[in-house]
Image (spheres, grey):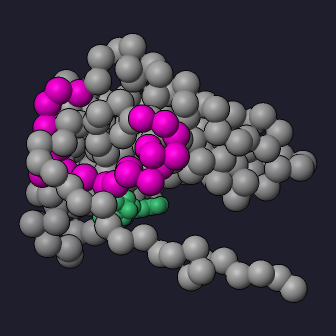
Amino acid sequence: MDAIEAILTRRTVPIPKLGEPGPDDATLDLWLRCAAAAPDHGRLVPFRFLVVRGEGRGRLGELFARAHAEERPDEGEAQREKLRTNPTRVPLVLIAWADVRPDHPKIPEIEQIEATAAAVENLLIAVHASGFAAKWATGFPAYSPAVRRGLGLPETGRIVAILYIGTPISDQPIPPRPAPGGIARPWP
Ligand SMILES: Cc1cc2nc3c(=O)[nH]c(=O)nc-3n(C[C@H](O)[C@H](O)[C@H](O)COP(=O)(O)O)c2cc1C
């Protein structure tokens, strides 16, 4: 699959449609090299990934649920249960976070987060081109201080993506995409 085809056919596969197997170590290594090839202003290398497999997935779900109970006690138990079980439903979870240097004299925080998002998209395309599939999620765990602390991230760390990754177990149609005329226009 060439790069253009991989970009045009990549699509999110929902968690219930992601099964075993996950990638082997060499494949994961390749994906991380693709991530690290993203544009990166000032070569700060803000992108970081926590690799969660095996029993770590259960511990991640427990962390999400515990943080949710602590910070959003009034939200429903069903939502908490989903947060708890989601990581265990896929073979691999990657937490992509930006190791932001807030006081950098030249590169603002937003650009460090943007570089991390670019790394995430590179990785998603590589996942797809390798025959696997993924879902980019954020929601409560991405913005929870208790989750950030539980993962051992610094206070300046920003979670950019929680990537649920596996092998697609059924076909997932490519969603309609906006036409070029809808997103671009000549100027002036
Ligand atoms: C920064 C970011 C955060 C997202 N967070 C969520 C999320 O928490 N839950 C969700 O269902 N989709 C989320 N999405 C959207 C999906 O990852 C996906 O892109 C969207 O459903 C469109 O599907 P596609 O990737 O096949 O085009 C997020 C996307 C981005 C870029």
Depth check: give the residue in front, 59 or 13: 13
Q: Tell me: 23 left or right of 103.
A: left
Residue under the point 28% across and 36% down? 132
Depth check: give the residue in front, 22 or 116: 22
**Magenta includes 142?**
no
Q: Residue furthest right?
A: 105
Q: Quadrant of the N terminus?
A: top left
Residue 159 appears in the figure: no
Q: Tell me: 44 left or right of 151.
A: right
Residue 171 x/y as whole percent: 16, 51
Q: Quadrant of the C terminus?
A: bottom right
Q: Quadrant of residue 144?
A: bottom left
Q: Tell me: 108 left or right of 74.
A: right
Q: Tell me: 68 left or right of 40.
A: left
Depth check: give the residue in front, 148 or 182: 182
Instruction: Report the number of discs.
Output: 0
Q: Quadrant of residue 46?
A: top right
Q: Which residues are magenta?
A: 1-22
Examine the rendered structure and indicate whether residue 15 appears above or below residue 87: below
**Magenta includes 3?**
yes
The image quadrant where one finds ligand 1 is: bottom left
Q: Residue furthest bottom?
A: 188
Residue 104 x/y as whole percent: 83, 46
Residue 64 appears in the figure: yes
Residue 30 x/y as whole percent: 47, 22
Residue under the point 66% across and 77% down? 184
Examine the rendered structure and indicate whether residue 6 appears above or below residue 174: above
Residue 101 x/y as whole percent: 73, 44
Residue under the point 55% across and 30% down? 34
